[in-house]
Image: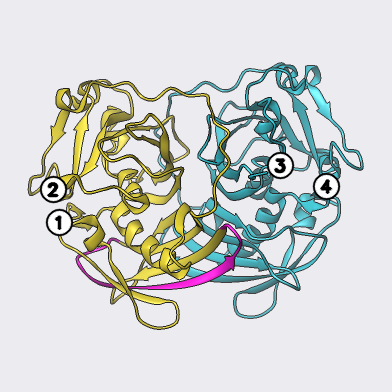
Chain colours: A yellow, B cyan
Amino acid sequence: MSLGADTAVTPTEDGRFTGEIQPGWDIVGNANGGYLLAIAARAASAAADGREPASVTAHYLAPGKPGPVSIVTELQKQGRRFSTVRATMSDADRPLVALLGSFRDTSIEMDSVERVEAVRPEMPPPDECVPVEPTETFPPPFMGKVELRLHPEDATNSAGVPRFRGWFRLRDDEVIDSFGLLVAVDSFPPTIFNAQLPVAWTPTIELTAHVRGTPEPGWLRCQFTTRFISGGYLEEDGEVWDGSGRLVAQSRQLALLPNT
Amino acid sequence: MSLGADTAVTPTEDGRFTGEIQPGWDIVGNANGGYLLAIAARAASAAADGREPASVTAHYLAPGKPGPVSIVTELQKQGRRFSTVRATMSDADRPLVALLGSFRDTSIEMDSVERVEAVRPEMPPPDECVPVEPTETFPPPFMGKVELRLHPEDATNSAGVPRFRGWFRLRDDEVIDSFGLLVAVDSFPPTIFNAQLPVAWTPTIELTAHVRGTPEPGWLRCQFTTRFISGGYLEEDGEVWDGSGRLVAQSRQLALLPNT
């Protein structure tokens, strides 16, 4: 199954959609947050006449397990270029994800001014990076859905820098659209794994993704960094670049350091 | 009037609140986005039994003008530590701000692990920085509500770097709580002003603020940077540090480069 098929939603009545959390997208039993976001965002996009995600924020309310979900959407504003939609995705028992996003009419051209004060993350080509293959436990089944190649410096878990760099694509080289980018920004191992701290599990409170463009086909160059483990939280900042050297998505999530 | 008084909300019925956009918080006629967010967040916080903002996202739907507003809130989940609330703030005619946020029970202690991979922005002390005083037009009336002292290198508009560093406090040295931080993250001039590009007006689509802690009294040390003017958008990343040298808030907004 493809990401496209695994995030499909069906309209039922006034702003409501049904979908299904498919098996195989989980990490120790709970569906990946980017995958859940992609399902909810597809419903919200449909509620916005098919406009494409520009900025979407998810707050995670409960873990997602394989099975049917429903998404209730509300169009908050339909502007000339952007529509703002909120949505709540629930399983049979409870809400899983609260979403708020703005969706863009891609037929209206964007401004072409370009000015980048950053360099794309440098890393060896995919074949010289470290593949992450799925197992029953760790690496998790989710890695059968996406293909990751980690920067060798970050794969060994010894650098002590809370950062992961590497390459991303969907399995079978499925074309990555804006919903695929929502998965990309949440596909790498948590940066905390590389921080050499006695902290392993950092649940995401909130994830915001900005889609800057449609990627060219092929591997995406990604970097996830944490600068502030502080106040009981950590942020994880993501950059996703395509093969043409353009930033196609930017993300930030706020995760909790569980008080153990 | 203080920020506290100017963002006060009153519960009316089941999850509904009234408030008022007070005069003086505007920038060329439209209320500052951080101020609007603070009003909406106070209502959302009240709907969460007074829990404090941890991560709040606003999508801006229409400009705010002085006058009464109503805020409709919905508690999405009440967890042990965090409550997630969504809210829409409207004036008499239309919705102005859509908000989604998680609010924290501050009586539950946070994890104390600290690991910071960043240095606080260096700048001369407030008295050696450049004050921004309000005028009828530019600097705008809003600057009568907050006190800014800009890093001399960033105040002259000649560096060509899309960045603003400086000091922030509320007028009359009003104590800055977590709602004050929501104003702080949207108080500096747009970074684009310093980019030496033929772009002046960049409306904010979305603003997310993470509150990491309660600031010590006194000036806050702030930095706002843009790395990617690309794809028709720019992000503005904010850091707010208090006098004790701790990060107290982090923010990102996505703004549009208007296609002129």
Q: Amino acid at mark 2?
A: Gly
Q: Chain of mark 4?
A: B
Q: Amino acid at mark 4?
A: Val
Crowding at label 2, few (<14), some or many (≥20) Cα neighbours within 10 Å?
some
Q: Label 3, secondary structure: give it.
A: loop
The image quadrant that residue B66 belongs to is: bottom right
Tag 2 residue: A144
Q: Are the residues flagged by discs 2 and 1 in contact, CB closer than 8 Å?
A: yes
Tag 1 residue: A24
Q: Quadrant of the C terminus of chain B?
A: top right
Q: Amino acid at mark 1?
A: Gly
Q: Are the residues under badges 3 and 4 in a single subunit?
A: yes
Q: Label 1, secondary structure: give it.
A: loop
Instruction: Give the residues drawn in magenta, as a range.
Output: A63-81
**Residue A80 lies within the magenta run:** yes
The span from disc 4 to disc 1 (Cα, nearest Å) is: 52 Å
Q: Chain of mark 2?
A: A
Position of residue A183 measured from the top left corner of the image (x, y, whole percent): 31, 49
The span from disc 2 to disc 4 (Cα, nearest Å) is: 53 Å
Position of residue B110 measured from the top left corner of the image (x, y, whole percent): 44, 44
Q: Chain of mark 1?
A: A
In depth, the one of A68 and B229 nearer the eye is B229
Q: Which mark is residue A137?
A: none
Tag 3 residue: B201
Q: Residue at x 47, y 62 (%)?
A: B83
Tag 4 residue: B28
